[in-house]
Image (spheres, rainbow, N blue to C red):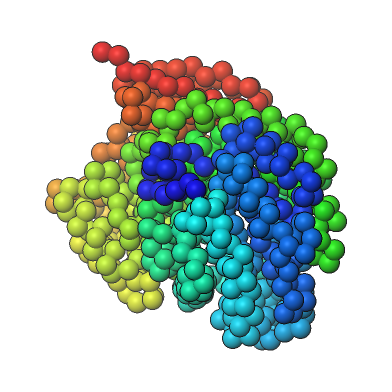
Amino acid sequence: MKDLSFDELSLTVDGKRTFLISGEFHYFRVPHDDWRRRLRLLKDVGGNCVATYIPWCVHEPEEGRILFGDRPERNLDAFLSMVKEEGLMAIVRPGPYQYSELLYAGLPQWLMEGHPEIAFKKEDGTPLSAYAVDFGHPVFLEKARRWMKAAADAIRPHLAENGGPVALVQLDNELLGLHVWSGAPMTRAFAEQGAEYLDTLRGWLEEDGVHGPFCHNAGSSDIAGCYAPCVRRLGTSNFLLGYDHYYTLNPTPESPSTEYFHKAIHACDLMRAYGFPPVGFEIQSGTIGDFAPVLKADLLACHMANLAAGLRGINYYIFTGGPNFPGTEATADIYDYGAPVHADGSLNETYDSLMAFGKFLASHPGLLESVRETSVQIGLEWPNEAGCAPADKAFMHNGMFYSLMQTPFHPQFVMLDHGFDPTKPLVLAGVEAMSAETQRKVADFVLAGGGLLVAPDFPRTDLDGNPCSILADAVGAPAAAACDVDTQRRPVCVAEGLRVFGVKPLRRFETPLKAGAEATLLSADGADVYGCRWQCGAGRVSQFGAKWKAHFFPQAEMAGRLVEWLGAKTVATSSNLNVPVAAYRLGSGATGVFALNLHSSPQTTVVTLASGKSHEFRLGAMEVGYAELRYQK
């Protein structure tokens, strides 16, 4: 029995901070005779945990006929017993959904084809997709309840509290993902329904003697912000939310990119904002199709990029596979997935990537107690981050965040309704709606001495669309009118004294500006003012009435100057702006620095910290470098 717990920094195993290294290992696919050898292959790359689905469709092939142990590859008891013998922990994922490229995403064929009434319906009354169910439909809940009881009975003897290896029990899989990816609109009501459904599953399991701890996996970094209602319902003491993150599911893109790294930061930041250590419950180690393949250098760069973003636990999806049960396959008879250990048991070259990553983690335990150093906060509120309230997320991520990542003033995402740091400048980028409560909270932050950057405008409505300008009124925002500048005819602006291209003005301020305000964004001829800043109580406010998509280095310099005026402090500078960096203050007093060359050719950069300490990284293609810099007086 191993006691797994967690705080916002990391996971602990038997009281010791531990990096979770798990491999997705499907007992129902892997030939029984090779279970032990492949478990040991996982241990050899540093693995301390196994994750597996418990597929409803495999164990209840006919309604009412639930099978555990009738054949070796359906013998969950034997598998978990062997996991314990090998000294590994286990994460079990009984669904009801599994996905995993199974027919009907792991739900039984008899359920989906025999009960069409449970289908999730579009507004016109037609089914959303062949795989999407209505979580609240009584027939679905009736059938799922029976299945979850059977799964609980199979899991219970193997719980850690009963001396077994099961450390986490996952509730469903990638909640809302399948529906949203099939075209269902994300609404607050839908997100709340999903949270209620997860809470129902937890209640069922607890009734049947499975008391957790429980976990769940946000389906992608893009929808990680949809889970605030789940966190409110399930809490953070006996529930761990993590994220899934893939750089390719075929055919493109073929390798992890800077954008992939940025999305990993977004997911890790949101997990910390919720109060969890960032855990990737599905970080790929293979991919569905045969081309383009997941390659050795790309995969190591992927895992190192997630680590640089803040990852503190990983589940390789998948570590190894094998034949599908007949009638459950959705993409292949043999589920190989290009995994590090192939379906036939042979080793892929990517196995070496896992070996290298495991060795790196073992040699850098200090990262477990570190948090990424940042000097600017990008504020989110769950409804607009989830797409349930008006917000320009493209500008937030691909304009503001991307540009700030190229500056010495490293940004982090914060959930304003969960709290934020009063000592760091706050950025609201593309936020059009915000609750009255959060507007007051941000206004109080400014009046108490905080720095606020708003672009292109202040939120003017609450989350229900009612007029609400509490924040703008509290900080004395100058009068401005909407404008639509033809940037093909007028391509250049003057921002913070720089000639900058690629900026789209959206607000024009009345001139002359109010007393004490100064212009920060002007038309090239100086006739029109699109941005300004002013003192507000003990704080500072800047409204930049424009947006942009990051294309040019001057845009990054512009963003850096905007937040520096608000009090942002230097974290680290990369001399090569195409090599992003992330810095971590370690308990030893050193600063751990990652430099990421997510490109197909070698790159060099010199990283300089605020202390003046610097380090030159000479990086090969698709290489993430790491160095620990110590300040010496």
Image point (25%, 39%), residue name: 567
Q: Position of residue 96 (x, y in %)?
A: 62, 69
Q: Position of residue 121 (x, y in %)?
A: 65, 81
Image point (28%, 69%), residue name: 436
Q: Is residue 57 left or right of residue 487?
A: right
The quadrant in which residue 71 appears is bottom right
Q: Is residue 522 visible?
A: no
Above-or-below relation of 257 to 325: above
Which of 50 and 283 lies nearest the eye of the viewer? 50
Q: Position of residue 590 (x, y in %)?
A: 35, 23
Q: Is residue 454 visible?
A: yes
Q: How many marks?
A: 0
Image point (32%, 18%), residue name: 631
Which of 147 and 353 lies nearest the eye of the viewer? 147
Query: Which part of the image, by quadrant, shows the C terminus?
Result: top left
Q: Is residue 270 left or right of residue 120?
A: left
Q: Is residue 603 left or right of residue 616?
A: right
The quadrant in which residue 586 appears is top left
Q: Position of residue 200 (x, y in %)?
A: 49, 75
Image point (67%, 73%), residue name: 132
Which of 256 and 363 lies nearest the eye of the viewer? 363
